[in-house]
Amino acid sequence: MTTTHVRLPSGESIPSLGLGTWHLGESRAARADEVTALRLGLDLGMTLVDTAEMYADGGAEEVVSEAVEGRRDEVFLVSKVLPRNASAAGTVRACEASLRRLGTDRIDLYLLHWRGRVPFEQTLDGFAALVEAGKIRHWGVSNFDVADMSELTALSGFCQTDQILYNLSRRGPEHDLLPWLAERSIPVMAYSPVEQGRLLRSPVLAEVARRHDASPAQVALAWVLRRPGVTAIPKSSSPEHVRENAAAVDLDLTVQDLSDLDTAFPPPDGPEPLDVL
C-alpha cells in the first residue's frame, strides 16, 4: 500500500485513507474480529481511526480502545460530540466520557457531529477549553453545508475538516461545498464512500473493476481518493475488507474510467441539499 496524505489547516498531515467504525461495537460476538480488523488497518498504514460517542452508544469507542492499546501514538484519533451535548460544559463532559471509553488522554480531532440547536459560540467555547486542557488537539465539524461553514468560520478560523457523506452516488457537494472548502484549504473527510455497500451492485463499477483486476469497492474508493484534499473513512469490520480497502490507494483510474463513471453517476448541475445518512 502506498500511503498518501492530506494536509490539515494546522499543517499536520493525516492519511488519505482511514478506518471508519460506524456500526462497530454493536455485537459482543463480533468484537474480536472488529479489533483484529482495526489492528490490521494500522499495520497497513491506515492510522486515522474515526469514531463517535453516538456509534453503538459509545461501544465503537470501546472497540477502538482495545484496537489501539499499546499503539496510541501511531494513531490519529477522531471522535464526535452529539449536537444535544454540544453546549460549552456539555462538550467538555462528552469529550471526557469519550476519553474514558477510548482509554486515552487526548483526541486528535474532535468534531461536532451535525448542527443542532446549541449556538456555535457555546460549542466553540467547549472546544477551546478542551484544547487548552490538552484533551483535544484540533476540532472540526461534520455534515455542514456552505451556509453552516460560512457562519462557523466567521466565528473561528480553526476548523480542521468537514466530514460529509460523499461518494459516487452522492455528488451534490461538488457543486458548491467542495470548491468552497478547497478555496480555504479545509479538507473533506468522506464517510460511507461505498454507500454502505449499495454502490457495489453497479454494473459500471463492475466493468471498471474488471479492467483493473480490482473490486468494485476499490474502484469506488479510488474515485473518492483521486480528489485532492479528501480523506475516505470506510467502515472496516473484517480483515478481508481492510486489505481490499487498503489496495484502493494504488488504483489509478483512467480518463475512460472516469468518463464512464460520470455517465453512470452524473455530477450535479446545480446546488443540492447536503445528504446525510
Image: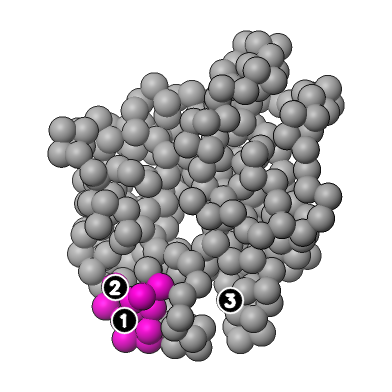
Give the percent coordinates (x, y) of residue 159.
Answer: 58, 72
Report the side of 235 relative to 225 (left or right). left
Q: What stretch is highlighted in magenta?
A: 83-94
Query: Which element is circle 3 on?
Result: loop
Give the residue at mark 2: 94
Q: Which residue is drawn at 25% across and 57% down?
A: 57
- Which quadrant of the rendered structure holds the N terminus? top right
Is the residue under label 2 in contact with that under label 1 (CB below 8 Å)? Answer: yes
- Tell which of 222 and 262 is nearer to you: 262
Label 2 sits on what residue type?
Ala
Label 3 sits on what residue type?
Phe
**In the drawing, what numbered circle is on residue 90?**
1
Query: Which element is circle 2 on?
Result: helix
- Residue mark closest to the camera, 1 vs 3: 1
Measured in 3D between alpha carbons, the distance from the residue under mark 1 to the one under mark 3, in whole angstroms, is: 20 Å
Give the percent coordinates (x, y) of residue 269.
Answer: 83, 50
Give the residue at mark 3: 158
Q: Earlier in the sequence, mark 2 or mark 3?
A: 2
Residue 40, placed above or below residue 8 = above
Residue 137, placed above or below residue 200 = below
Quadrant hosting residue 43: top left
